[in-house]
Amino acid sequence: MNITKRGSTYHLVRRVPKRYGSVEPRGTIWISLHTDSENEAKRKAPVAWSLMEAAWEARLAGEVDDAERRYEAARNLAAMRGFRYLPVEKVAALPRQERLERLEAVMRNGEPDRIEAAAILGGVTPPPITVNRALEMFWTLARDRTLGKSEDQLRRWKNPRIKAVRNFVEVVGDKAIDQITPDDVLEFRQWWVERVETEGKTPNSANKDFTHLADTLRTVNRMKRLGLVLPFTDVALKEGEKRVRPPFSTEWIETKLLAPGVLDGLNTEARCIVLGMVNTGYRPSEAAGLLPEHIRLDGTVPYVSIEPVGRQLKNATSKRLIPLAGVSLDAFRQCPDGFPAYRGKDKISDTVNKFLRENGLLETPAHSLYGLRHAFEDRMIAARVDERVRRDLFGHAYNRERYGKGADLKHLHEVVSSVALCARSSASSSSKSRSNARKIGR
């Protein structure tokens, strides 16, 4: 780089690269470095040249026809010149001195430069944001929501939003979001009503579409400061009585699920996840996410630690310790390193539910693997285990202020052991266990 002193100030002098000939008529440029120190000038020269190249690139981009690229180029070029991009009407409303500064900045040899004027005086119209484009922008604008999610969790988070946008565009078209009318939303709602009536879809499916679509567009509206009023209120379909997943009865678990050899058709990891769930009530995804260091079998109290490592937990209270006892402890002794076949994948529930269904191991058609979680809680309720203790074990929010640390691991182990089931438990031993649990839970 050629650094030359003109008067008391150093300048960077360089030939203009051929690439920028269409946007820079000068063959050689002089850039003031605003210093009389040669060392300081040498330090500032590379930065000044980099900024100059960035400005030329913005001018090149400003020549293209694509509305979005032209708008972004105008914003970048204005920033390079030390101004915040404003639409022309806001530039006109600026104080007189600020308007003059902008006008002076666009002059080249006594004439206004077309591209500079478009950028600094706000002459580029912002491109319309369509529904599909809003979804693309949403992934970046809402990236804080994805922090800590595993690849599989991210896929499951994205898919319903992609589906909602695809359905809306199919019905209404890929409209600019500032052109969406209440009639458009009602038309989308009616499309869903017809699907519920003729295709057996549930109102819940429709309402998820409304929720995800509205959240996507409202996030873009808020984060981009568009100031739009989006017509997505009061569109939900009436869902009726919510389906409740029933718990397995203790008798069914003991005589069917824990009978010798009944679960041998499952692979070892899937079988151990099922058996581990019997006396822990963990969520299947929590078990699948366990790492070897989260499984502690060698201490006085064996336990698993549910932690947000490599994935997000459902909520903050889901981070917890669960002691192991009975058939669940036996299962983790078989799988002390966790379940790598299912780690980071959303398939354990489907695998197990299919097996249980095909082998007649579901107590009713409404039952599923999740019924083991509810069954474990029912046994604790029957044993009169304190609500705070139950919520801590299940990772449920507590509706009152939490005081103190709660039950320690030893006490939690006593509670879990008192209601734990073992393979081939007899009715009498089960009854005795529940009797002991009532004493501990008081």
Image: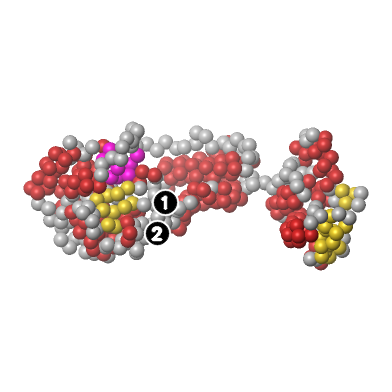
User: Where residue 200 sits in the image (x, y, percent)?
Assistant: 40, 46
Q: Work out whether residue 41 or residue 279 is closer to the camera in this orientation and state it.
A: 41
* Front position among marks 1 and 2: 1
Left or right position of 374 against 132:
left
The secondary structure type at the circle numbered 1 is loop
Circle 1 residue: 312
Residue at 24%, 58% in the rendered image: 297
In the picture, the disc for residue 246 is: none
> In which quadrant is the C terminus drawn?
top left
Tell me if residue 52 is in the magenta stretch. no
The image quarter containing residue 300 is bottom left
Query: Label 1 amino acid?
Result: Gln
Left or right position of 213 against 32:
left
Q: CA distance from mark 1 to mark 2?
A: 11 Å
User: Where residue 422 sits in the image (x, y, percent)?
Assistant: 16, 54
> In which quadrant is the N terminus drawn?
bottom right
Residue at 12%, 46% in the rendered image: 433
Question: Which tag, 1 or 2, sits closer to the chain's start?
Answer: 1
Tell me if residue 394 is in the magenta stretch. yes
Residue at far right of view? 110
Structural crowding at the residue carrying mark 2, measured as other residues with C-alpha within 10 Å and reported as few (<14), some (14–19) or many (≥20) = some
The image quarter containing residue 3 is bottom right
Query: Label 2 amino acid?
Result: Gly
Q: Work out whether residue 147 or residue 185 is closer to the camera in this orientation and state it.
A: 147
Circle 2 residue: 344
Q: Is residue 245 visible?
A: no
Region rendered in magenta: 388-397
The image quarter containing residue 275 is bottom left
Q: Work out whether residue 394 or residue 131 is closer to the camera in this orientation and state it.
A: 394
Residue at 36%, 43% in the rendered image: 317
